[in-house]
Image (cartoon, rainbow, N blue to C red):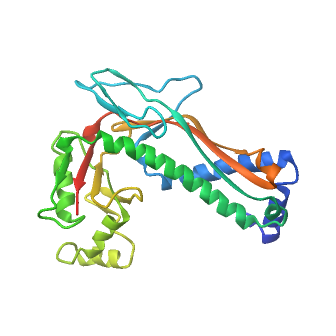
Amino acid sequence: MRDEVTFEQKVERFRQSVASEEDRNAYAESWAELILVKLPAEATVRNIYTIERLPAGASPVYTLDFDYVNAWVLPKMGSHPINLLQTEEVTIPTFEVAGHVSYKLQLARDGRFQVADQARRRLKDSIVDLEETQGWTVLKAAVTAGNTFDLTATEDGLSLGVINQGFKVMEARRGYKITDIYASPNKVADIRTWTVTTISDEVQTRVFDNKGLGSIWGANIHTVYGLDDDEVYFIDGREGLLGYMPIREDLKTFDDPTAIKSFRVGIIAYEHIGFGVLDPDRIVKAVVD
């Protein structure tokens, strides 16, 4: 049985975190592991792209075996994606992603460890938001006109008809399969309006009990807070097929040495990552109302 940490022990540990510069550095570095554990569950792009941690000095170059390459990459943080055509190799640029939080030094001296827990959540959320924004920017740019459909004239919101059409468009090509469906919270909420004439009593009860639909026809349904209400995405997210998220440097956290001069404790998070879609046909977009 794992030993439980008492309230008093948590208080003392947090006080110790600012006892010296060495303690501040060690405490700040310990945040990285705690944040990294949570990223896969909260950053949807880490499940859509295939993650590859690069060995030191390695280049994120990918050799493709397609007759015609139509890849999309992000040159740098916050830029517009670029389209790479007719090439057998694609280099996915990597860029820095960074976040920062701080809190009063006195709060640490008082042992208010809950303050650090809140700050760590804010730092984690900032990294998740940055990864989501950059990764989805590439995914949206990569969607082809042939893989986009609009049933707003006949279907309301995220209906079974819309989902069925997404499967039809994706599975029109041999070997392609929808593994995941991504939509905004408002569109995922449309599922709660499905009636027993649409889904079985058992599934309706599960939705009513707020357990969610979970999956349909083998595809998992996900909520993405950065998506607009007029779009739903169907993804073939099987490993190594759609694209890659190369990680040149995994997430690290550091003490901000300038913060202490203002009697604050600052924590900096940093990683070096990239996003590249190598097969846009594995993304289908539905326009919904």
Picture quadrant where residue 12 is located: bottom right
Q: Is 251 drawn above or below residue 287 in the view shown? A: above
* Residue 122 % position (x, y): 60, 58
Which percent across, then down, holds residue 38?
56, 54
Residue occupying the point 12% across, 62% down: 153
Q: Taking 261 as reference, is 224 above or below it?
A: below
Outermost front residue: 262
Q: Would residue 197 be found to the left or right of residue 111 on screen? A: left
In the displayed structure, does residue 263 sit left or right of residue 179? right
Q: Residue most toward the left? A: 154
The residue closer to the viewer here, 23 or 220, is: 23
- Count of marks, rendered view: 0
Front-most of 118 and 11? 118
Residue at figure coordinates x 80%, y 53% from the top left: 262
Q: Quadrant of residue 86?
A: top left
Residue at x 55%, y 49% (from the top left corner)? 127
Task: Work out whether residue 238 can be spotted.
Answer: no
Q: Quadrant of the C terminus?
A: bottom left
Q: Tell which residue pokes out farthest to the right in this image.
A: 19
- Quadrant of the image containing the N terminus: bottom right
Q: Is residue 284 visible?
A: yes
Percent from the top left, x then y, of residue 64?
33, 25
154 in relation to 242, above or below: below
Residue 169 in percent (x, y) is at: 17, 48
Q: Is residue 281 above or below residue 266?
A: above
Front residue of 243/178: it is: 243
155 relative to 12 in the view: left or right: left
